[in-house]
Amino acid sequence: PAGGGGNGTLPRYVRVNTIKTRFDDAVDYFKRQGFVYQGRASPEMKGVASLSGKTFLLDPHLPGVLIFPPGTDLHEDQLYKAGHVILQDKASCLPAFLLNPTPGSHVLDACAAPGNKTSHLAAIMGNKGRIFAFDLDAKRLATMSTMLARAGVTCHNLAHQDFLATDPGDPKYSHVEYILLDPSCSGSGIVGRLPYEEEERMDAQRLQALAGFQRRMLGHALKFPALRRLVYSTCSLHQEENEEVVRDVLEQHGRDFRLVEALPSWTPRGLGVFAEAKCCLRASPKETLTNGFFVAVMERRQAETEDQS
Ligand code: SAM
């Protein structure tokens, strides 16, 4: 999973779970454990790559995300076991942060397990509203259920279901204004996940199959009638699964939806395979000290005024 940092080369990112604790209380806890708090890192993340010893920083881009030195193992930590903090790579915190659903809203998480982004969405919503969370994989859903319980999430509806088989016209979903779409991908951005030989086998045919699936998922998501904002994300570095998927789907749905600029202050942008691709953002171990990642944010176009006068 995109936990980040487990390989010992990336910083260990820790998201404070505001459903269970307050940010200041988590910082105080780590200080009591002997960690020295060095405040907010610079936007350029200067010094973060060389962070070492018992120190930690506040992430400059994502609220409530702390940065510990690479290799810091918090899996046995009480705060983690109690669900007060989530061990989640910084890049994988971007999608929920950018979707930013309002408390009380209805949200659909199309590919949800094992659920780190679902619990992040719930925290942003103050655990108020509803998250319809789907996944095809029963084992991953079981893990997700445990994980959400530990995180204190109560606003979710888990379903063992193919997102492509959901009916966007079902009245159940008539208030869904936000969709997070984080579909299966090649995983080529995850540091240390694929052995080199497997990376080599990522042939054009396999990528095309994944991209076809991703286009179908994105096209389906854009059919939900009340949808206002959608975030599409992958942990892939391949433009076939990223910019090209977004480009192709917007060619069909561009009259209703447009890309919006995701986190303008973030430097690595979408590859220039079409004019608006710069609205998307990318992440990589080298440039952002995270796993490789891609995020696109789409919004429904405002209805044109029909006033002819
Ligand atoms: N969003 C998750 C998180 O942050 O923990 C990670 C999701 S993972 C990248 C992709 C997930 O999509 C897998 O768990 C897979 O089982 C699920 N999946 C694949 N095809 C699906 C489909 N047609 N409908 C629903 N889920 C699907």
Image (cartoon, rainbow, N blue to C red):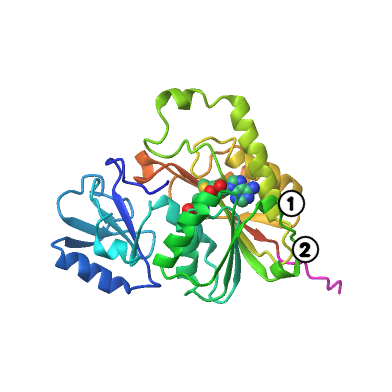
Instruction: Answer above or below: position of 7 versus 302.
Output: above
Measured as percent of width and height from the top left, residue 244 is found at 63, 39
Disc marking residue 253: 1
Residue 17 figure quarter: bottom left
Rendered residue at 58%/71% (across/down)? 130
Q: Nearer the viewer, residue 284 or 179?
A: 179
Residue 255 belongs to the span the image colors magenta? no
Looking at the rendering, the stretch of residues picked out in magenta corresponds to 302-309
Relative horizontal placement of residue 192, taking residue 35 as reference (left or right): right
Q: How many marks?
A: 2
How far apart are the two marked residues, 1 and 2, measured between alpha carbons?
A: 17 Å
Mark 2 secondary-structure assignment: loop
Residue 306 belongs to the span the image colors magenta? yes
Q: Amino acid at mark 1?
A: His
Measured as percent of width and height from the top left, residue 153 is found at 46, 69
Viewport quadrant of the C terminus: bottom right
Rendered residue at 63%/37% (across/down)? 211
Magenta stretch: helix, strand or loop mostly: loop
Mark 1 in CB contact with mark 2 (< 8 angstroms): no
Disc marking residue 169: 2
Rendered residue at 56%/36% (across/down)? 239
Measured as percent of width and height from the top left, residue 78 is found at 25, 64
Looking at the image, the residue that sits furthest to the right is 308
* Residue 263 in sight: no
Mark 1 secondary-structure assignment: helix
Q: Nearer the viewer, residue 1 or 259?
A: 1
Instruction: Choose the circle earlier in sequence order: 1 or 2.
Output: 2
Few, some or many residues within 10 Å of mark 2 (<14, 14–19, 20+)? few
Disc marking residue 281: none
Q: Amino acid at mark 2?
A: Gly
Q: Nearer the viewer, mark 1 or mark 2?
A: 2
